[in-house]
Image (cartoon, rainbow, N blue to C red):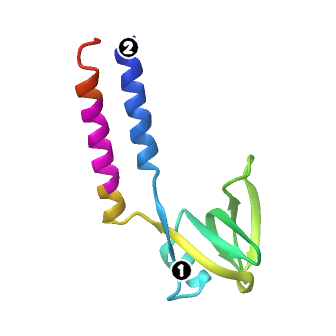
Amino acid sequence: MLRRSRASAISALFLTLAGCSSWHTIESESPAAYIARAKPSRVRLSVAESTLVMGHPAVSGDSIVGTLSASRPREKVAVPASDIGKLEGPSSGPGLLGFVLVTGAATVLYFLSHFRGGY
């Protein structure tokens, strides 16, 4: 039983770390051009006084449409491209990947060295 709970804890940690990402600001092109070219799974939009994370963004006319990632059930939204002050796309560069791999390896080594005898 103890072995199964440790395996579950390690699996949960790796799944959490695999979901890590950071954001980078899109400045070189318009929001519509970036979304049409990169087809990101989500974007972060800054509009007036708020910021929202939009899942499955797409261009529809002069607006960016998608679903609000924070709402349950997923709420469909449309934001006029002219209202977007800042657009950020997901980034998972080599620095983040290295961090995830090192942290994951350190966690596994910790569990192996501290809980070796309880099987």
**19 is higher (above) or lower (below) than 6:** below
- Is 113 in front, or is 75? 113
**32 is higher (above) or lower (below) than 90:** below
Left or right: residue 29 compared with residue 4: right
| Residue drawn at 76 percent across, 78 percent down | 48
| Residue drawn at 36 percent across, 25 percent down | 7
Looking at the picture, which amino acid does disc 1 mark?
Tyr
Please provide percent x and percent y for residue 84. 69, 81
**99 is higher (above) or lower (below) than 113:** below
Return the mark for residue 2. 2
Looking at the picture, which amino acid does disc 2 mark?
Leu
Q: Main secondary structure of the magenta part?
A: helix
Please provide percent x and percent y for residue 19. 46, 50
- Is 103 in front, or is 23? 103
Say if residue 61 shows up in the picture: no
Q: Secondary structure at mark 1?
A: helix
Q: Quadrant of the C terminus?
A: top left
Please provide percent x and percent y for residue 39. 52, 70
Mark 2 vs mark 1: which is more N-terminal? 2
Which portion, as a residue range, is magenta?
Answer: 99-110
Say if residue 82 shows up in the picture: yes
Return the mark for residue 4. none
Nearer to us of marks 2 and 1 is 2
Residue 108 on the magenta span:
yes
**6 is higher (above) or lower (below) than 16:** above
- Is 116 in front, or is 7? 116
Residue position marked by numbered label 1 in the rendering? 34
Q: Secondary structure at mark 2?
A: helix
Residue 57 on the magenta span:
no
Kindly report the distance in space between the C-alpha atoms of the residues bearing marks 2 and 1. 48 Å
